[in-house]
Image: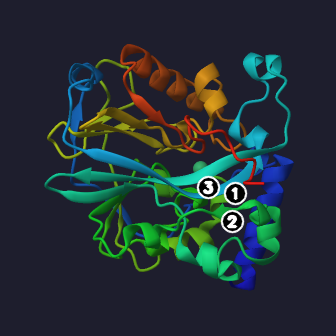
Amino acid sequence: MKRRTRTLLLAAALLCVSGATAALALRSRVTTHEARPASLGVARATSELDALVDVQGPLTVETVVGADWAVATSGLLNLDHPKAKAAGLRDELAPIVIVFHAVQHPTRGLFLVDTGVDRALRDDREHTAFGGLAGRFLHADRLLVRQDTASWLAGRPVRGVFLTHLHLDHLTGMRDVPNDAELFTGPGESAEVGLVPRLLRGVTDQALEGKGALNELRFAPDRDGAFAGVLDVFGDGSFFALHVPGHTKGSTAYLARTTRGPVLMTGDACHTRFGWDNGVEPGSFSDDRPASAESLARLRAFVERHPRIDVRLGHQLRDEAPRVGAR
Ligand SMILES: [Zn+2]
């Protein structure tokens, strides 16, 4: 990796640690990669989703753990929340996973939600965003690859990638994704503001190098007011995008109606099991923490109405004990 990129990453890591990002917020795009409005998707009301969500659907979803890692609890969770305080949570390194979800549509093909980790993270880490000095600040020594995205894909074509948001840990597998896969993000995601997105622009651009434009999903206001927006992505009622701003402006969760019931992929609207179980929103990793709390509350209310929903969180598995950085 270029020295400049390393310096930027290092600066970003230091800023994350110091918590000084809010005071230093600057307006700047997170990537110079082309972004344009997406042409697919039909706006729906939440009541229309509510009526359909428990009906068996045509999709399959496989959640693939790319790597185990560890990051600061204060980034993952609002430690000032009464429930976090009551549980005695402290700011320490918390075990997380980096995942992608493989969504198979019977006629449209294979889509990914987020990207996992690329093979270079396993074989040539020094030449990734996790190499060198920056890697030390990112605790790269605790990042252990379980399965890289290229190995899982094994040459299979990918029709598209739905990015829950544009943070680096959701782009870490992008280089293993075929260049002809269409990319989708939430609205305004590439125009994310703040110093950290600006500092990470170089590595974000690198991750997207050679790919097509970012297609930004176009939500309409949900007439039921339950979500910021609901989009029937393919127009056939099988796969829905839910606008859940807060962690980032364009953060998007996805609901798949599968042959085995509904699956909700929250992205980083909720990183952790504790956050989901206790309704504690993300901490310093989120741009707009009140909005992040509201989006989490909306997702939890949705699942309360539909308890059969299988919830797949941003960075922890609900059916597997965290591996504490796999050590
Ligand atoms: Zn993340």
**Depth order, front residue of 24/258:** 258
Mark identifier at residue 199: 2
Residue carrying label 1 = 195
Residue pictured at 49% horizontal, 22% vertical: 300
- Ligand 1 neighbours mark 3 (CB distance < 8 Å): no
Q: Are marks 2 and 3 in contact (CB under 8 Å)?
A: no
Instruction: Classify residue 169 by image quadrant.
Output: bottom right
Give the CA distance from mark 3 to mark 1: 8 Å
Instruction: In the rendered view, tell whether residue 245 sits above or below residue 8.
Output: above
Which amino acid lies under the numbered mark 2 shown in the image of this protein? Leu
Residue 77 lies left or right of residue 99; in this view the side is: right
Q: Residues within 10 Å of mark 2 (few under 14, many from 20)?
A: many
Between label 2 and label 3, give the one nearer the viewer.
2
Q: Is residue 260 above or below residue 177?
A: above
Q: Depth-wise, is mark 3 or mark 1 nearer the camera?
A: 1
**Mark 3 or mark 1: which comes first in sequence?**
3
Q: How many marks?
A: 3
Horizontal side, residue 326 vs residue 50: left or right: right
Residue 104 in sight in this render = yes
In this view, 240 is above or below 279: below
x, y percentage for residue 219?
31, 39
* Residue 304 on image: x %, y %: 43, 15
User: What's the colour scheme?
Assistant: rainbow
Which residue does the numbered mark 3 point to in the structure image?
27
Residue at 31%, 18% in the rendered image: 224
Pointer 3 local density, CA inside 10 Å: few below 14, some 14–19, many at least 20: few
Where residue 286 sits, quadrant-wise, is top right
Q: Secondary structure at mark 3?
A: loop
